[in-house]
Image (cartoon, helix red, strand yellow):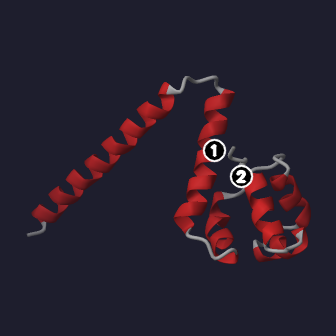
């Protein structure tokens, strides 16, 4: 079973033998706020994802996957959405990607 993002941070921290104070300092947070994040009482700031990846020598994409999947899961749960929401979301992401590729091609062709 996957954990929420705060629990994920706690796991990384403890597996690496770090205290709350040590990790908080590296993330430019105070230890009380980090404790609230780990306990699910406060959200982690997306702007700190890169720092978190750096501290634990992880790929930023892996950290983003954990962060955003938690965010999406909470929204789907809080709003009592069906699992179809995830399939529609995937379709919309693919649409946005294809639209951006087409726009990039158009911009490229007009600059010739």
Which residue is outermost to the left? 112
The location of residue 61, given as percent across then percent down, is: 52, 63
- How many numbered dots are placed on residues in this image? 2
| Residue where numbered disc 1 is placed | 71
The residue that appears at 56% across and 67% down in the rendered structure is: 60
Decide which of 29, 11 is in the foreground and name it. Answer: 11
Q: Image check: 3 left or right of 85?
A: right
- Write down the quadrant of residue 109 in the picture: bottom left
Decide which of 42, 89 is in the foreground and name it. Answer: 89
**Residue 89, placed above or below residue 46:** above
The location of residue 108, given as percent across then percent down, is: 16, 64
The location of residue 107, given as percent across then percent down, is: 18, 60
* Residue 5: numbered disc: 2
Label 1 to label 2: alpha-carbon separation: 8 Å
Q: Closer to us: mark 1 or mark 2?
A: 2
Q: Are marks 1 and 2 in contact (CB under 8 Å)?
A: yes
- Write down the quadrant of residue 10 in the picture: bottom right
The residue that appears at 58% across and 24% down in the rendered structure is: 81
The residue that appears at 56% across and 70% down in the rendered structure is: 59
Q: Image check: 56 left or right of 38?
A: left
Dot 1 falls on a residue whose secondary structure is: helix
**Quadrant of the image containing the C terminus:** bottom left
* Residue 50: numbered disc: none
């Amino acid at each position: 079973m996957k954990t929420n993002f705060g629990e994920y941070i706690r796991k990384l921290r403890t597996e690496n033998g770090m205290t709350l104070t040590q990790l908080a300092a590296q993330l430019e947070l105070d230890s009380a706020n980090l404790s609230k994040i780990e306990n699910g009482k406060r959200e982690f700031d997306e702007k700190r994802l890169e720092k978190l990846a750096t501290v634990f020598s992880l790929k930023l994409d892996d950290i983003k996957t954990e962060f955003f999947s938690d965010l999406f899961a909470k929204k789907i749960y809080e709003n009592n959405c069906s699992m179809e929401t995830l399939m529609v979301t995937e379709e919309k992401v693919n649409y946005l990607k294809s639209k951006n590729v087409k726009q990039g091609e158009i911009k490229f062709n007009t600059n010739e």
